[in-house]
Image: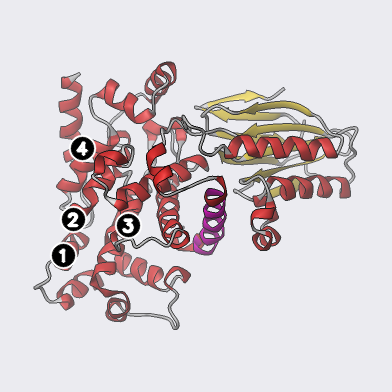
Amino acid sequence: MLRVVGISEMYVSADASDTVVTYSLGSCVGVSAYDPVAKVGGIVHCMLPLSKIDPVKAQLKPCMFTDTGLTILLQELFNRGATRNNLVIKVAGAASLLDEKGLFKIGERNYTVLRKVLWKNNLLIAAEDVYGTASRTLSLYMNTGKTTVKSGGKEVDLK
Amino acid sequence: MSDIREKLIEKIKSIPAIPVSAAKAIRLLQDQDKNLSEAIRLIEYDPGLTTNILKLVNSSAFAAERKITSLQEAMVRLGAKNILQMLIGSSMAPVMNLPVAGYDIPPGELWRSAVTAAIYTDEIKRILKLNLPPHAFTAALIHDIGKIALASFIQLNPEEIISYAQSKGISFVQAEQEKLGVNHTEAGMILLKAWNLPEVFEKPIMYHHEPEKADGDVVTEIVHIADALTMMEGIGTGNEGLHYKISDNIFEKYKLDVDVLEHIICSVQIKRDELKDMFS
């Protein structure tokens, strides 16, 4: 079944027939995590780097922020049997507008925070498609753990 | 090139207009001397329009204390000007829900991005404490109407335009201009005139990518910011991606730094959740 993850949402699945997908990753980051042994995986779609800008809203919608959203995704996967050693992490998004002076680099900041959270959890990124100006769609196929990125009409295997 | 341009313009002009009753009511509402009840009567005969206006007026965005059930009440509560804005917005919805093939934008997505830009406009106004005229919301809602004109009714080759934009390092709107001789802002203007919409929308439609050219029109400047932030979220971008040139001057003018922007993005997200059902 197609499980659509909206902006500031996550979905965790243990059903091999599921495809977890998130659309319209601009400067947001999408993280797909899959444990091939426990056969559990999920995607989170985070929009802003740090929850400290609005702790009240962060409680309401923790997946809006990369620091809280990614932490919750990992926690949920561990709760459902995933282990650090087996978890395969793939990342897409963190694009920017054509912003010559670099007034705001939300994509870049999202990515930096993401690396930090992963580093704290002793996790590495297995594959990624980040930066640039593309709007991306990230999909996780639960039967095999295959993760793809689609942008500009082309879907490619992220590996 | 001029051949393509002429053909495109002819086709844009033939795009079916908004519902006749809406068009008539829009004209009536603009005319100060006309009796407003005449406009209400016109709208009342159109169940789609009436429902949309009642949905909007009862949404949390307008914070009605009790349910408003008639157009008459809605008119009293919001005033003719706001009803006019809503009417324009809601008559665009069916058109905006068409798939935008040329841009690889799925059905409903352009509408979703239009609504997002409109919510951004409201939140920017609130957070920066700006004094914006009531048509700002609608201007954000319809600023990209030209994309429909260019893409749904004309088979343009988006691959060609996007790769051209990428290879030259220019924005998608510039690439449209260079490859087709007409871009979606001009196409929007042609529609605006063909549909008899108020002149206040000219600048936001025409210059939302080049707000410096709008002679300081605040609505155009805010629509530019709202549009850029919507794009940044990746909403309604399709093949255009984030190939969007932002105006540093405008962002500086409103003192928009990372902190303020993140604050705005955050509150838009919450507000959009509240409004989710309304536009589905």
Count neighbours of disc 1 (C-alpha within 10 A) and say few if under 14, some if 14 to 19, many if 20 or more.
some
Question: What residue is pinned by disc 1?
Answer: B30
Could you tell me which secondary element the residue under label 2 belongs to?
Answer: loop
Query: Please, what is the three-letter code of the amino acid marked with disc 2?
Result: Pro
The answer to whether one can see residue A2 in this image is no
Parent chain of label 3: B
Q: Which mark is residue B136?
A: 3
Name the residue furthest top.
Answer: B167
Disc on the earlier residue, 2 or 3: 3
Callout 3: helix, strand or loop? helix
How far apart marks 4 and 1 lie (CA) works out to 25 Å
Disc 1 is placed on an element classified as: helix
- Specify whether A58 is left or right of B144: right
**Does B268 sit left or right of A142 as displayed?**
left
**Relative height, residue A85 to residue B139 (above, below):** above
For label 4, the residue is B12
Instruction: Say which amino acid is labelled 1.
Output: Gln
Q: Chain under label 2?
A: B
